[in-house]
Image: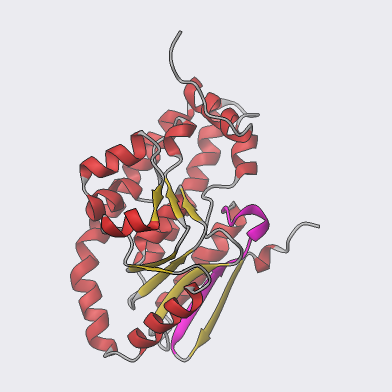
Amino acid sequence: MEQDTKTLVGFHLENGVGYITLNRPQARNSINEAMFELLLDILQQCEKLDQLRVLVLRSQGSVFCAGGDIHFFSQLLTVSTAERQQQLARYIGLAHRTIEALLAIPCPVVAALQGAAAGYGMSLGCAADIIIAEQGCQLVPAYNELGATPDGGLTYLLPTLIGNKRTLEMLWLNRNLTVEEAQNWGLVNRVCPAGALDQAVEEVAVSLSRGPEHAQRNLKRLVTQHLRLQLSRQMEQELNSFLSCAATAEFVKGVQAFLERHTAAFKKD
């Protein structure tokens, strides 16, 4: 039975802490268009919510977010190049508006990662102010295997956090990072034992919620306002690059290999 779209993303507020929960565990919380629309709407409402002191972004199931929706990418191979680009423009447009809405949240945002944060899931994590990750979780770039370039502002967020050389190595070579490596690189704030993620996130969220609200919001604005301005421009370039990649035979080969669960061979004959 197909899941009710209204349940794909949940939200509740408790003692000043808001919890946004990605709830598509059967698809490893990969994000389809309906899910983007719900997440975007919730984030836009959270921006105006006076009672919100801290926002936690988390997910149900064993994986935080597997990135883009596999069924969406599958059907892209059945349409013309022009139609493929048109559908991608809408989909990535929603993805980018979601990142902008997440960055617009005036209070601290904490991302809770388990299992894997892949592709766009990495972007969601990087756009949070604090990342707490469970042991065993991996950060998975994925884009190069598709014959595509990143979206979700990842080409700005990652270099800002870990530098250009590490970013290029990670993205070019599809290098999956353990959370311990990610913490050493400055990408993850805290790593907690398996099974202790909820408790670790709760401790940080409660501590933040008891802090001076006005000062915390001002501090966030001072630290991140330049990022928001630069990121919007970068995401325009990411969209153009992704659409350009989508028109190539390499993209078709990469998506087919992804759907068939093997690594594409991009070497020219």
Vertical arrangement, residue 234 with respect to residue 84, above or below: below
Vertical arrangement, residue 269 with respect to residue 89, above or below: above
**Which quarter shows the N terminus?**
bottom right
* Residue 210 image point, x, y percent: 34, 92
* Residue 152 image point, x, y percent: 40, 50
Q: Name which residue lies at 33% across and 41% down.
A: 170
Q: Residue 181 or 38: which is nearer the viewer?
A: 181
Q: Name which residue lies at 59% across and 59% down.
A: 35
* Residue 182 image point, x, y percent: 33, 55
Q: Which corner quadrant of the image does residue 25 belong to?
A: bottom right
What's drawn in magenta, residue-wise?
16-30
Q: Residue 143 or 236: which is nearer the viewer?
A: 143
185 in magenta = no
* Residue 176 image point, x, y percent: 41, 45
Q: Name which residue lies at 53% across and 71% down.
A: 195
Q: Does the rendering let one see residue 248?
A: no
Q: Does the rendering let one see residue 89?
A: yes
Q: Residue 230 or 211: which is nearer the viewer?
A: 211
